[in-house]
Amino acid sequence: MKNSTIATCLFLFNGLYLLTLFAYPIVLMMSVFMFDALTSYEYASNYAAAFYLLMSYPIAVLGSLSCWGFYHKGKYKWAIAMANLLLVWIALFILVLIVNSILPF
């Protein structure tokens, strides 16, 4: 190991992200119920952003796994940034949920 402290952090982050992939199909199926009994097209388009963002979760996890390429090249700051890429996805999801609760349509 080149830098054992950073490697340990990367293992912890990626292990946690991969564990959440086991619950991902259940959460995705529950998100289908966001479209249940809608009354108008505008209401459906309001929740479409949250649904598509949920569908992109595995892409964010796979993107965060690219941190190991940066780790092996010795670019430790980029490795930590790529490992925390999923935190940007979480912040974006929270922002979409806040916007969905504020907007009337």
Image (cartoon, grey):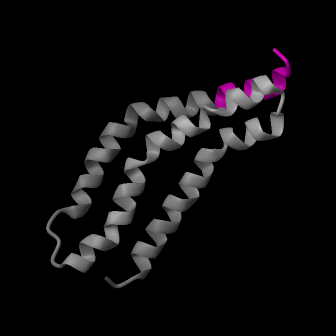
Q: What is the quadrant of residue 67 in the picture? A: top right
Q: Quadrant of the N terminus?
A: top right
Q: Residue at x 32, y 38 (%)?
A: 25
Q: Quadrant of the C terminus?
A: bottom left
Instruction: Give the prevailing secondary structure in the magenta stretch.
Output: helix
Horizontal side, residue 89 vs residue 101: left or right? right
Q: Which residues are magenta?
A: 1-12
Q: Residue at x 37, y 56 (%)?
A: 52
Q: Which residue is more in the foreground, 52 or 20?
A: 52
Q: Residue at x 57, y 39 (%)?
A: 63
Horizontal side, residue 77 vs residue 102: left or right? right
Q: Position of residue 45 (x, y in %)?
A: 29, 72
Horizontal side, residue 32 vs residue 21: left or right? left
Residue 9 to residue 43: above or below:
above
Q: Which residue is more in the foreground, 47 or 59?
A: 59
Residue 25 to residue 39: above or below:
above
Q: Residue at x 76, y 27 (%)?
A: 71
Q: Position of residue 87 (x, y in %)?
A: 61, 50
**In the image, farthest residue toward the front:** 73
Q: Which residue is more in the foreground, 71 or 37?
A: 71
**In the image, farthest residue toward the top:** 1
